[in-house]
């Protein structure tokens, strides 16, 4: 199925169609390494279009590795506010400090050292190696997986396993433009080989695609368990119309972030709740939240009040804002 023309076809398409993303602009080698590190952290669990404005603001406020290693936590979180998965921001700062202290301020150039940095696993290390250091490595993100599934018409659970997809990467032959090449394949997945209604007439490698020949583009995924949990959010508002919140030390999600006082409750209590109920999806958890208006503060009132008319001084996760918007 492979062809000597595959890399050329993909790179020619990329040169003419790639998006102007801020971390792809022509910059110095040091900047490219920093921009790649920040963007890859932000792109974990988050779409490109969402990341772009956050990345622009982050780089403006925290322009290099040294400033990232020294940034105050409140400023860091303010720059990340609304992007979600806040552990990424904390790990990014920890990684910067480790790079400064243990790697002489240079982003490591091998996978083993990269994976020693907080928040960097197998995929992110491979992506950094390919994009920042032009290494001939193809990391498996959602876009590349989708392209491979369609090219080889992979439908069965064994066929779409990570192990098999890694083997199928050989379809993408090596090229000296490794950094551009991996971004080009990702770009084809994002812009052309979309989850539904792929634009096959614009695809540079459609003639090598089994799904195109069969006219069957359905993507089969391995089902991930989406756990349903039930919570009660306790809302206390004082006479000055300020709301009581606290730092989350209780739940594994949104660690140390500002939330309303909450308790996990049984499903029956949620169903019997009289009042507003909302749903919020977070990672692999489907959260059902009963909103309960309280008159008295909790006994361990180690929280604080916020003025919802002026939130500029507070870093609130989207989760808390969704609850707040449901009661305002």
Image (cartoon, rainbow, N blue to C red):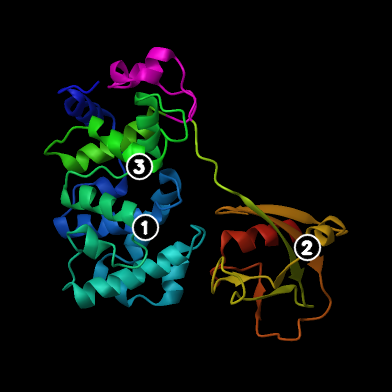
Callout 3 secondary element: helix
Identify the mark nearer the N-term, 2 or 1: 1
Determine whether, in the image, residue 63 is placed left or right of residue 283.
left
Above or below for 202 versus 246? above
Find out whether the residues at labels 1 and 3 contact each other: C-beta distance under 8 Å: no
Q: What segment is highlighted magenta in the picture?
A: 194-219
Identify the mark nearer the N-term, 1 or 3: 1
- Which mark is on residue 41? 1
- Does 200 appear in magenta? yes
Callout 2 secondary element: loop
Determine whether, in the image, residue 324 is placed left or right of residue 199.
right
- Which mark is on residue 266? 2
Give how far apart the Cα atoms at labels 1 and 3 are. 24 Å
Label 2 neighbour load within 10 Å: few <14, some 14-19, many 20+: few
Percent position (x, y) of residue 89? 41, 66
Determine whether, in the image, residue 33 is placed left or right of residue 122.
left
Q: Name the residue under label 3.
A: 163
Of 127 and 327, the residue lying toward us: 127
Instruction: Name the mark nearer the viewer: 1 or 3.
Output: 3
Percent position (x, y) of residue 229? 69, 58
Instruction: Name the mark nearer the viewer: 3 or 2.
Output: 3
- Does 21 appear in magenta? no
Q: Is residue 197 visible?
A: yes
**Which residue: 57% across, 53% down?**
284
Percent position (x, y) of residue 287? 67, 56
């Amino acid at each position: 199925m492979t062809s000597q023309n595959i890399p050329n076809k993909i790179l020619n398409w990329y040169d003419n169609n790639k998006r102007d993303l801020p971390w792809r602009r022509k910059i110095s080698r040091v900047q490219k390494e920093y921009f790649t590190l920040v963007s890859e952290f932000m792109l974990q669990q988050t779409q490109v279009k969402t990341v772009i404005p956050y990345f622009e603001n982050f780089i403006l406020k925290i322009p290099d590795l040294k400033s990232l290693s020294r940034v105050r936590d409140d400023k860091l979180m303010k720059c990340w506010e609304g992007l979600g998965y806040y552990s990424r921001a904390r790990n990014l700062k920890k990684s910067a400090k480790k790079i400064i202290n243990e790697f002489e301020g240079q982003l490591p150039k091998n996978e083993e050292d990269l994976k020693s940095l907080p928040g960097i696993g197998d995929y992110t290390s491979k992506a950094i190696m390919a994009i920042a250091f032009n290494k001939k490595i193809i990391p498996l993100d959602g876009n590349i997986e989708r392209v491979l599934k369609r090219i080889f018409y992979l439908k069965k659970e064994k066929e779409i396993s990570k192990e098999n997809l890694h083997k199928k990467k050989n379809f993408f032959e090596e090229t000296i433009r490794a950094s551009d090449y991996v971004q080009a394949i990702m770009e084809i997945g994002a812009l052309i080989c979309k989850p539904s209604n792929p634009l096959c007439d614009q695809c540079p490698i459609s003639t090598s695609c089994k799904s195109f020949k069969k006219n069957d583009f359905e993507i089969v995924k391995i089902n991930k368990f989406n756990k349903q949990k039930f919570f009660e959010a306790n809302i206390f508002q004082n006479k000055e119309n300020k709301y009581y919140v606290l730092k989350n030390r209780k739940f594994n999600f949104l660690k140390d972030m500002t939330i309303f006082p909450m308790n996990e409750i049984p499903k029956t209590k949620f169903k019997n709740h009289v009042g507003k109920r909302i749903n919020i999806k977070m990672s692999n958890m489907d959260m059902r939240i009963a909103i309960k208006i309280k008159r008295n503060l909790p006994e361990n009132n180690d929280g604080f009040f916020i003025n919802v008319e002026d939130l500029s001084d507070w870093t609130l996760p989207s989760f808390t804002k969704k609850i707040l918007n449901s009661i305002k």
